Image: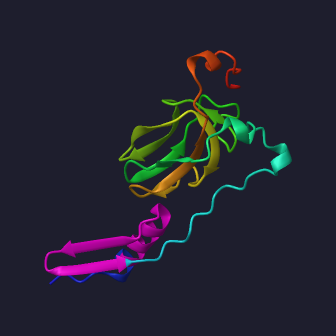
Amino acid sequence: MVAFQYEDVDELLTMMERWGIAEVHLTVEEASLDLVRALPAMLPHPTPPAQEMPCLPEDKLEREPAIVRAPAVGTFHLAKRGFRHGAPRVCDQVQAGQIIGTIELMHVPNDLISPVSGIIDEILAADGAGVEYGQPLMVIRPYEEVSEDEAGMLPPPAR
């Protein structure tokens, strides 16, 4: 019968903490090991004070935010191009279909696409953090819908 060594279990716990994994079930031959740990609550990035926020006025945004969730387990990375500061930040404008990040799994990046055009309200996961399937990553407040006639009257989003 195989016995798990303390060093191996300690290494597993370290990897679980580093990658944000809550549970592991391991079976080797006839021996099995279940590791379960509580995950700390993820805090959103701090937002600048309201007077410094370059967001659009409330009347130009819909009230119901869109929540961007992780489509797979992996490592979350913010997009490195297409934003004023090199990566998306709170109050940045995004367009539907724009790449806002990636989920990397086994060294293969998968693009994370914005489902709506609007303003980033919150970024809930840190760049480089391990994420679970379905975990909320960003909150985007969509622009209000306008008719085709009105669309020509709104200024284009800042880049």
The quadrant of the rendering that contains the C terminus is: top right
Q: Residue furthest right?
A: 51
The quadrant of the rendering that contains the N terminus is: bottom left
> Is the residue 135 above or below the residue 53 in the image?
below
Residue 91 placement, left or right of 111: right
> Is the residue 58 above or below the residue 73 in the image?
above
**Looking at this view, is 134 or 127 the one in front?**
134
Q: Identify the residue at horizontal 78%, vertical 38% (top origin).
A: 54
User: Residue 87 appears in which quarter of the rendering?
Assistant: top right
Q: Position of residue 50 (x, y in %)?
A: 81, 49
**Looking at this view, is 5 or 60 the one in front?**
60
**Looking at this view, is 115 or 134 the one in front?**
115
Q: Position of residue 48 (x, y in %)?
A: 78, 50
> Is the residue 151 above or below the residue 77 in the image?
above
Q: Position of residue 71 (x, y in %)?
A: 39, 47
| Region of the chain picked out in magenta, as a range | 9-35
> Which colour assignment does the render follow?
rainbow
Q: Any magenta on residue 40?
A: no
**Looking at this view, is 152 or 85 the one in front?**
152
Q: Position of residue 38 (x, y in %)?
A: 47, 76
Residue 8 placement, left or right of 66: left
Q: Identify the residue at horizontal 63%, vertical 50% (top origin).
A: 122
Q: Identify the residue at horizontal 65%, vertical 15% (top origin).
A: 152
Number of numbered discs on residues: 0
